[in-house]
Image (cartoon, rainbow, N blue to C red):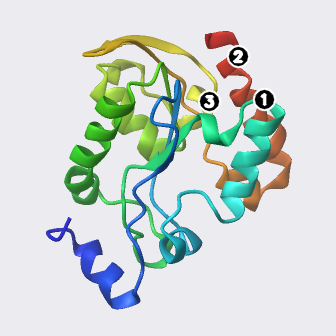
């Protein structure tokens, strides 16, 4: 990760890398885009306001957070919380790919457009890519080296931080997990 321009930002800001957390036997893997300020300060994914919304969506869907694995494509925070750059995704993608190989989830839920585009491309679903609002809650069946996988892109929980009226729409996507099993 030292070759990433975000590495210097992390060291200079005295932040932590945000690798991921949760069950290594998780059937569901949630993949965000990049850590926010609170996440970089603690080293924990989705522990800020978007994380609270994520937790409530999981709870309402009857899923314990400790039973899933939560991570991001980028493991370091971009300055000013900007979107991930393509070259940053390229640098951090091998770490995410290894996490997927280790966890072997049955469902991968990319949270947000950058995660959705990366995961769908990785699993051969490039032709299915649409705006995240159109992909939200749809289930795509694909194969991996470790078996069948369902890709269920979802809106990023931060959408409900900025627009509380989106929480109901966000939550509806989490109900797709029940239908996928």
Q: Nearer the viewer, mark 2 or mark 3?
A: 2
Location of residue 119 by image quarter: top left
Tag 1–tag 3 contact (CB < 8 Å) = no
Q: Observer-nearest residue: 152 or 107?
A: 107
Q: Observer-nearest residue: 3 or 86?
A: 3
Measure the C-alpha gap from mark 1 to mark 3: 16 Å
Give the mark nearest the N terminus, 2 or 3: 3
- Determine whether the residue tagged by mark 2 lies in a helix, strand or loop: helix
- Determine whether the residue tagged by mark 1 lies in a helix, strand or loop: loop
Indicate the position of residue 104 as horizontal and vertical percent values. 38, 25
Binning the other alpha carbons within 10 Å of mark 2 as few (below 14), some (14 to 19) or many (20 upward) gives: few
Binning the other alpha carbons within 10 Å of mark 3 as few (below 14), some (14 to 19) or many (20 upward) gives: many
Binning the other alpha carbons within 10 Å of mark 1 as few (below 14), some (14 to 19) or many (20 upward) gives: some
Tag 2–tag 1 contact (CB < 8 Å) = yes
Name the mark on residue 140.
none
Q: Which residue is mark 1?
A: 61
102 on left or right of 174: left
- Give the answer, above or below, for where 50 lies relative to 61: below
The residue under the point 70% across, 29% down is 174
Name the mark on residue 178.
2
Location of residue 61 by image quarter: top right
Indicate the position of residue 102 as horizontal and vertical percent values. 32, 33
Measure the C-alpha gap from mark 2 to mark 1: 8 Å
Q: Which residue is mark 3?
A: 136
Q: Quadrant of the N terminus?
A: bottom left
């Amino acid at each position: 990760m030292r070759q990433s321009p975000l590495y210097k930002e992390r060291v200079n800001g005295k932040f932590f890398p945000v690798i991921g957390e949760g069950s290594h036997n998780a059937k569901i893997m949630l993949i965000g885009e990049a850590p926010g300020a609170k996440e970089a300060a603690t080293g924990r994914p989705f522990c800020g306001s978007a994380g609270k919304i994520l937790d409530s969506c999981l709870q309402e869907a009857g899923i314990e957070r400790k039973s899933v694995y939560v991570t991001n494509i980028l493991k370091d925070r971009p300055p000013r919380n900007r979107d991930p750059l393509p070259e940053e995704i390229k640098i951090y993608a091998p770490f995410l790919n290894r996490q997927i190989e280790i966890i072997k989830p049955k469902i991968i839920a990319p949270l947000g457009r950058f995660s959705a585009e990366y995961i769908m491309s990785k699993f051969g679903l490039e032709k299915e890519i649409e705006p995240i609002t159109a992909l939200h809650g749809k289930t795509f069946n694909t194969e991996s080296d470790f078996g069948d996988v369902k890709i269920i892109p979802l809106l990023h929980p931060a959408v409900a931080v900025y627009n509380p009226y989106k929480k109901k729409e966000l939550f509806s996507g989490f109900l797709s997990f029940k239908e996928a099993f």
